Image: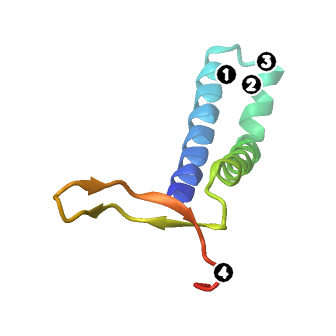
Amino acid sequence: MRRYIYIACAILIAIILIEALRLISNRMSQDNKFRQFIEKNRIILVLLVSIILSVLSFAMFELKGASPSLQYSPATIENDGTIKDGAFDLRDAASE
């Protein structure tokens, strides 16, 4: 689920950045070449920023994600009523 949130955030940030550039360019004079470049290539810029942010978010997800050799053990309630926290444990070779 976190992966989809990263993708959505990357796309949303790209749209916000392009719209911010559009607002800035609208305040510039009509003869400005920077404004003309942004207006002409807006879709390409959105795609480019989205791809860059998506790659960065995927890299962050892969680097900070749990190791594939780990297995999650959920929280459990002990006999005396205490709660044992969930944790990531090493997988047993026999359980695979």
Return the x and y of residue 34 as percentages of the image width and height: 80, 23
* Circle 4: residue type: Ala
Residue 39 locus on image (x, y percent) = 72, 35
Indicate which disc, 1 or 3, sits on the residue closer to the N terminus: 1
Q: Is residue 72 above or below residue 6?
A: below
Residue 32 marker: 3
Foreground tag (4 vs 2): 4
Q: Which residue is mark 1?
A: 25
| Vertical arrangement, residue 78 with respect to residue 18, above or below | below
Label whose residue precedes the other's in the sequence (1 or 2): 1
Position of residue 32 relative to residue 16, above or below, is above
Is the C terminus in the top left, top right, bottom left or bottom right quadrant?
A: bottom right
Evaluate if marks 1 and 3 touch, with contact meaning CB atoms under 8 Å apart. Answer: yes
Does 11 sit above or below residue 89?
above
The residue located at (64%, 35%) in the rendering is 18
Report the residue at 44% width, 66% height from top: 73
Marks 3 and 4 in Cβ contact (< 8 Å): no
Percent coordinates x, y for residue 61 in the rendering: 64, 51
Mark 2 or mark 4, which is nearer the start of the sequence? 2
Mark 4–mark 1 CB contact (< 8 Å): no
Which residue position holds label 2? 35
Circle 3 — which element? loop
- Mark 1–mark 2 CB contact (< 8 Å): yes
Q: Residue at x 59, y 53 (%)?
A: 7
Density class for disc 3 (Cα within 10 Å; few <14, some 14-19, many ≥20) is few
Give the label, 4 or 1, closer to the camera: 4
Within the image, what quadrant is residue 36 found in?
top right
What residue is shown with label 4?
Answer: 93
Q: For marks 1 and 2, give the CA distance.
A: 5 Å
Looking at the rendered structure, the secondary structure element under dot 1 is helix
